[in-house]
Image (cartoon, rainbow, N blue to C red):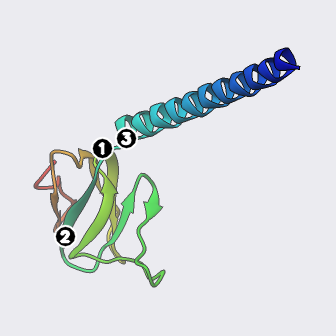
Amino acid sequence: MLADLESIEKGACNRRVVLRRWVAAAAAILAMLGVAYFLTTPPRVHVNFTTYPFEATILLDGVEQRGPDRNLLKTPCTIEGLPARRHHVVFSISGLPDLDAGTIDFSATRDIVARWSAAGPASPEDR
């Protein structure tokens, strides 16, 4: 009978050890996923956009930018929470050809200023 009790205690102890190992392994996996997410997600930045003339629509990577109210954002404005990486920036305004500001790295440039010339689009002041 004592042997039976010892074997039951030993089995329960083994189950606890196995459970602890599973919990530790799951915690380690979650920690690695958190670190991987942190390392692969670029920080977020605020970027100022100004065009001359004002009231240009902003396209980032081909997508018109909209505010929380779903209205198109127009220059001059600041867009918050953009990924700090390279983006292709184009400005569009009624009556003028689109102004391609090129690819701009938002991790290095936070103020984008562009102007149309009288003869058509000019190069942006900041790239």
The quadrant holding residue 94 is bottom left
Q: Residue at x 44, y 39 (%)?
A: 34
Q: CA distance from mark 3 to mark 2?
A: 34 Å
Q: Which residue is mark 3?
A: 38
- Going by the image, does 11 lie left or right of 107? right
User: In the figure, 34 relative to 56: above or below?
Assistant: above
- Going by the image, does 91 lie left or right of 34? left
User: In the figure, 44 relative to 57: above or below?
Assistant: above
The front one of 49 and 121 is 49
The front one of 95 and 106 is 106
Tell me, yes or no, whether the two marked residues, 3 and 2, touch with CB atoms within 8 Å: no
Tell me, yes or no, whether the two marked residues, 1 and 2, touch with CB atoms within 8 Å: no
* Type of amino acid at the residue the image marks with label 1: Arg
Q: Which residue is mark 1?
A: 85
* Type of amino acid at the residue the image marks with label 3: Phe
**Label 3 element class:** helix
Q: Residue 40: x and y, percent?
A: 39, 36
Badge nearest the viewer, 3 or 2: 3
The front one of 47 and 22 is 22
**Label 2 element class:** strand
Tell me, yes or no, whether the two marked residues, 3 and 1, touch with CB atoms within 8 Å: no
Q: Quick one: which residue is furthest to the front in this view?
A: 1
Q: Residue at x 39, y 62 (%)?
A: 59
Q: Residue at x 27, y 80 (%)?
A: 55
- Going by the image, does 19 lie left or right of 76? right
Give residue 51's mark.
2
The quadrant holding residue 56 is bottom left
The front one of 29 and 54 is 29
**Label 1 element class:** loop
